[in-house]
């Protein structure tokens, strides 16, 4: 048996085409969605991701401002910049690319972003609303993962979903969203004992650990849906996931590739949140 490969790239292209149409209509009503992306420092991976976001904005017709600043920027300057975008009426979404230089507090920066413009879904207000199941901006990678599972046609209700990884941006929120889809959820992590015995119980396995090709065939239940969130470079500089694709593809029923899986979905959900933010602002203006 060979797994069906879920192309995040294809699903992302479908969603982007629909967003593009929506943006065209919004513009006719005088609403022009805008995204500010703030990139600090010279990490090549961050620069490459930000280029991807810029390209997606162009493709969909979203106005984008990318601010690239040196790692020597002070926290105060960065907070001031965010404050400016919080007030800027042309900007509906603000994203500060992570990680940040060590002298800047990630928490202070995230807290400075207005929850109404927090299209990453990282502020405590959005995280709290997500936990409650209330209206919020969903974090992009977890939202993209749920969308991919839905579009693979696989049921989540009643299934055992195992998430490996407990970060605030992927592991924890994706576990909450799977729970909202009525899955039975287990969160495993670096201190988990006998990882394979737990992952082998998973009908849905989401891997977000940041270790190249950690998960192999022996970790996977035959017929499982396997979602690979990893973005790693292997010894020869090739982009690989947290899942060993070649062995797992013969065990899983559905498998996302890296590249071309979760990554393009992450960017697409950011675009969706930005369009939603612009629509929401327009609605509140009408009410005033
Ligand atoms: N505030 C913030 N928000 C983020 O959403 C955020 C962040 N910081 N910091 C870093 C992570 C990582 N991330 C990715 C986005 C797209 C791809 C992506 O499109 N990857 C392509 C390949 C890209 C390549 O070739 O390098 C793919 O998987 O097909 C990957 C990773 C967003 N992040």
Image (cartoon, rainbow, N blue to C red):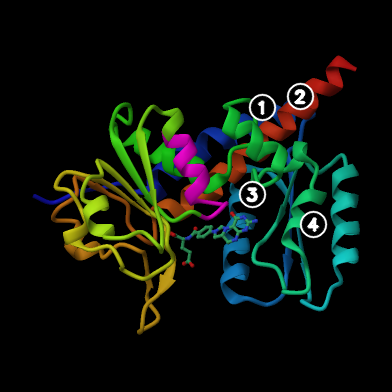
Q: Which residues are magenta?
A: 167-178
Please determine whether, in this image, residue 17 is positioned above or below residue 212.
Answer: above
Label drawn at residue 25: 1
Residue 6: x %, y % from top left: 30, 46
Circles 1, 2 touching at the beta carbon (< 8 Å): yes
Badge 1: how crowded within 10 Å, few (<14), some, or many (20+)? Answer: few
Q: Would residue 21 be seen by someone viewing this image from the given angle?
A: no
Q: CA distance from mark 4 to mark 2?
A: 36 Å
Q: Residue at x 58, y 44 (%)?
A: 139
Q: Front-most of 22 and 99?
A: 99
Q: Which quarter of the figure has residue 126?
A: top right
Residue 280: x %, y % from top left: 74, 27
Badge 1 marks a residue whose secondary structure is helix
Residue 265: x %, y % from top left: 47, 47
Q: Residue at x 61, y 43 (%)?
A: 271
The residue mark sitting in front, 4 or 3, is: 4
Q: CA distance from mark 1 to mark 3?
A: 16 Å
Give the main secondary structure, helix, strand or loop, of the magenta stretch. Answer: helix
Q: Residue furthest top?
A: 287
**Pointer 3: what residue?**
57
Q: Would residue 123 be seen by someone viewing this image from the given angle?
A: yes
Q: Residue furthest left?
A: 1
**Pointer 4: what residue?**
108
> In the rendered view, does 17 fall on the left or right side of 250?
right
The residue mark sitting in front, 4 or 1, is: 4
**Pointer 2: what residue?**
29
Q: Which quarter of the figure has residue 285?
A: top right
Q: CA distance from mark 2 to mark 3?
A: 19 Å
């Amino acid at each position: 048996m060979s797994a069906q490969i879920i192309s995040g790239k294809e699903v992302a292209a479908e969603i982007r085409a629909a967003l593009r149409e929506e943006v065209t209509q919004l513009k006719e009503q005088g609403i022009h969605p805008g995204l500010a992306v703030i990139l600090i420092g010279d990490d090549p991976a961050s620069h490459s991701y930000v280029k991807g976001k810029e390209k997606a904005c162009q493709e969909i017709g979203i106005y984008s401002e990318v601010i690239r600043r040196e790692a020597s920027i002070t926290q105060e300057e960065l907070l001031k910049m965010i404050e400016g975008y919080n007030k800027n009426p042309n900007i509906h979404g603000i994203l500060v690319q992570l990680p940040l230089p060590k002298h800047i507090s990630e928490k202070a920066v995230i807290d400075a972003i207005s929850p109404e413009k927090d299209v990453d879904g990282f502020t405590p207000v959005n995280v709290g609303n997500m936990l409650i199941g209330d209206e919020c901006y969903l974090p992009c990678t977890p939202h993209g993962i749920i969308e991919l599972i839905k579009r693979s046609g696989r049921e989540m209700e009643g299934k055992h979903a195992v998430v490996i990884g407990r970060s605030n941006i992927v592991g924890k929120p994706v576990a909450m969203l799977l729970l909202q889809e009525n899955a039975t959820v287990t969160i495993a992590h670096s201190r988990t004992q006998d990882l394979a015995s737990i992952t082998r119980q998973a009908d849905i396995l989401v891997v977000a650990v940041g270790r190249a090709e950690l998960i192999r065939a022996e970790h996977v239940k035959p017929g499982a849906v396997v979602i690979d969130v990893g973005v790693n470079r292997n010894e020869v500089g090739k982009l690989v996931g947290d899942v060993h694709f070649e062995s797992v593809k013969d065990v899983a029923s559905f498998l996302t590739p890296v590249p071309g899986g979760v990554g393009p979905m992450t960017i697409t959900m950011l675009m969706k949140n930005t369009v939603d933010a612009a629509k929401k602002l327009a609605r509140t203006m009408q009410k005033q």
